[in-house]
Image (cartoon, rainbow, N blue to C red):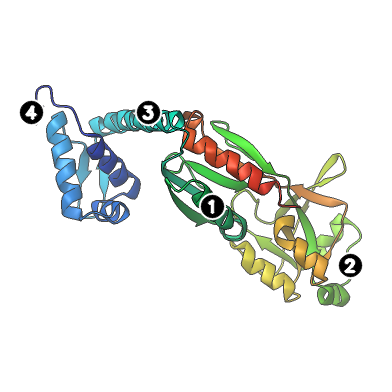
């Protein structure tokens, strides 16, 4: 394939190329970008022609990067980051955050607390275009194309920046009728004989609860007939009297105040603070800084 002399790839073609990689296909990339698969295919052909090399191996089932494709991927990420930072600096200069922001969070906290905050953020900065995606799984914010994650839990990847938004902890609790039926545990080891509602999501080790008791750390292995990867489902099971739950105060505090749940072993808890997490490459992004500072102020009013 002959390289066009002095030809420079268009940023839009690089963006399409990265989306094809991220979505592992032309149709999925086209759907994400709001374009036709034929247009996406045409832009990749133009990019390959401009660079004079094949970037993708195509089969009926999948696509894979060539060696040159991997090189172009690294450069494309760098080039588009530079464009984003240029845009952010210009926005900073005019004191009006603008452009796209792609955020993610967990289902429960995202729906109940992040979504209302984003609604107010959009009102404060109408020039921002904000997308919020919710997951109950670990998210690779760089490779999945996110600018910011609102994360519950203190394990911040070393290559990212974490800004503390609000203090939070997970506590043990159960419905009054369950405790009346099965008894209230008075020692951590007693949980091994109880029905425990186990959640497999994000940073939680499945079947092991790592807890703080004063200045010491203790663990207990738990099991029960019900488990799920969705915290809201497990919370409903706890309300139904099915067992003991380890859940964030942001979720159970009103239920404890209403008496629908009772805290068990109140001396034990698990740190689970709320953080804004973003790649170090976006540390100087004006729109991201405005977003994080807004969220800091918003979550100051969230009492846990």
At a point 70% along the width and 60% down the height, the residue shown is: 251
Q: Which mark is residue 86?
A: 3
Q: Nearer the viewer, mark 3 or mark 4?
A: 3
Q: Secondary structure at mark 3?
A: helix
Asked which quadrant contains residue 109, the reply is bottom right
Disc 3 packing (10 Å; few <14; some 14–19; many ≥20): some
Question: Disc 3 versus disc 4: distance between alpha carbons?
Answer: 32 Å
Do the residues bearing badges 3 and 4 touch, measured as CB atoms within 8 Å?
no
Labels 4 & 2 near each other (Cβ < 8 A): no
Q: Are marks 2 and 1 in contact (CB under 8 Å)?
A: no
Q: x, y percentage for residue 139?
A: 50, 47
What residue would you read off at disc 1?
118
Mark 1 and mark 4 lie on one chain; the one further toward the N terminus is: 4
Marker disc for residue 2: 4
Q: Quadrant of residue 7?
A: top left
Q: Position of residue 30 (x, y in %)?
A: 26, 53
Task: Compare marks 4 and 2 and give the one earlier in the sequence.
Answer: 4
**Residue on which the image places disc 2:** 184
Position of residue 80 in the picture relative to residue 232 (left or right): left
* Nearer-the-camera pick, 148 or 69: 148
Residue 256 visible: yes
Mark 2 or 3, nearer chain start: 3
In this rendering, the answer to whether 131 lies above or below 225 is above
The spot of residue 116 in percent (x, y) is 58, 57
């Amino acid at each position: 394939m002959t390289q066009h002399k002095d030809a420079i790839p268009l940023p839009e073609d690089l963006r399409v190329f990265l989306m094809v990689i991220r979505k592992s296909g032309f149709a999925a990339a086209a759907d994400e970008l709001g374009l036709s698969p034929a247009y996406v295919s045409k832009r990749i052909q133009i990019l390959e022609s401009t660079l004079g090399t094949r970037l993708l191996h195509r089969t009926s089932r999948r696509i894979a990067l060539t060696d040159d494709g991997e090189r172009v991927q690294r450069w494309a990420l760098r080039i588009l980051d530079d464009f984003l930072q240029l845009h952010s600096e210009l926005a900073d200069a005019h004191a009006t955050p603008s452009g796209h922001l792609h955020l993610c969070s967990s289902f429960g906290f995202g729906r109940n607390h992040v979504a209302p905050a984003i609604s107010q953020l959009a009102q404060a900065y109408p020039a921002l275009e904000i997308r919020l995606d919710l997951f109950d799984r670990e998210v690779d914010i760089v490779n999945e194309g996110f600018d910011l994650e609102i994360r519950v839990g203190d394990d911040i990847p070393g290559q990212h920046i974490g800004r503390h938004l609000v203090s939070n902890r997970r506590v043990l609790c159960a419905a009054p009728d369950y405790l009346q039926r099965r008894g209230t545990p008075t020692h951590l080891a007693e949980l091994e004989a109880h029905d425990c509602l186990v959640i497999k999501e994000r940073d939680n080790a499945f079947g092991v609860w790592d807890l703080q008791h004063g200045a010491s750390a203790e663990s207990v292995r738990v099991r029960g007939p019900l488990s799920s990867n969705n915290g809201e489902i497990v919370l409903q099971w706890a309300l139904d009297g099915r067992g003991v739950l380890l859940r964030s105060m942001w979720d159970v505090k009103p239920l404890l105040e209403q008496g629908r749940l009772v805290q068990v072993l109140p001396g034990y808890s698990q740190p689970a603070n709320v953080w804004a997490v973003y790649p170090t490459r976006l540390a100087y992004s004006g729109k991201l800084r405005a977003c994080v500072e807004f969220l800091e102020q918003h979550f100051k009013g969230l009492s846990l």
